[in-house]
Amino acid sequence: MLLQLETFEKGDVFIQRNKRNEKEYFILSGVCKSYLISPDGEEITISLFTENSIISPQSTRTSGNTSNLNFKALTNLELVSMNAKEFESLMIENMEIRHFGNTVLQNELISKVDKEIGLASMTAKERLIEFRKKYRLLENLIPHTDIASYLGITNISLSRLRKDLSK
């Protein structure tokens, strides 16, 4: 079977760092994050993924088919997965799928660069405002600790900013 339906409950880690992973993932419903564990044992949110989107391509999140990141369901999550080599074969055979795959890679790069620039050049308040534009309603669905980590601020700072922006 080319496609496989996978479901995960909120809190499930479905890709583990330093473990083999040879799949591509397409989110049907729910929200998940990629993250790393800091030296202090805290989860540092790298990226967020929402329904009807694609998790970072296998070629960008693995080295030698070994995952560089952890991925966790932040809500109940429904995915479709497929073997990355099979997807690559489809890209070679079909121009539309190749274009789709290249667009996914390009969007991944743009997203990473935008986040990097935002962390370096925007205030925490500006980053929260941009987060709200990009991820409408996500603040009500996922833990604020994950949002704060994604924004590069503490949970207390996020709470203060949220209060300030609601005035």
Image (cartoon, helix red, strand yellow):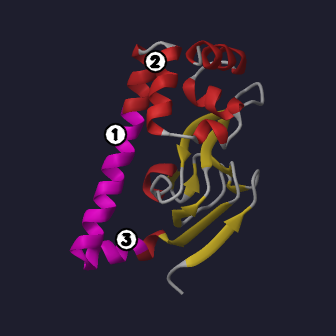
For marks 3 and 2 on the same chain, the one whose residue lies earlier in the sequence = 3
Q: What's the distance in space between the residues labelled 3 and 2, CA to CA?
A: 38 Å
SS at mark 1? helix
Coordinates of residue 155 in the picture (x, y in percent): 70, 21
Check whether the beta carbons of the residues at disc 1 and disc 3 lie within 8 A of each other.
no
Q: Mark on residue 110?
A: 1
Residue for point 34% across, 39% down:
110
Kindly report the secondary structure that dominates the magenta region of the rendered protein: helix
Residue that carries the numbered disc 2 in the rendered image: 126
Callout 1 amino acid: Ile
Give the camera-side residue of 130 and 48. Answer: 130
The stretch in magenta equals 87-113
Coordinates of residue 71 in the picture (x, y in percent): 64, 50
For marks 2 and 1 on the same chain, the one whose residue lies earlier in the sequence = 1
For marks 1 and 3 on the same chain, the one whose residue lies earlier in the sequence = 3
- Establish if 77 lies above or below 167: below
Q: What's the distance in space between the residues labelled 2 and 1, CA to CA?
A: 19 Å
Q: Mark on residue 54?
A: none
* Apparent side of residue 7 relative to residue 134 in the rendered image (left or right): right
Callout 2 amino acid: Glu
Residue that carries the numbered disc 3 in the rendered image: 88
Q: Does the magenta run of residues contain 90?
A: yes
Callout 3 amino acid: Glu
Image quadrant occupied by the C terminus? top right
Task: Specify the quadrant of the image occupied by residue 120.
Answer: top left
Pick out the residue farthest to the front.
Answer: 167
Task: Specify the quadrant of the image occupied by residue 149.
Answer: top right
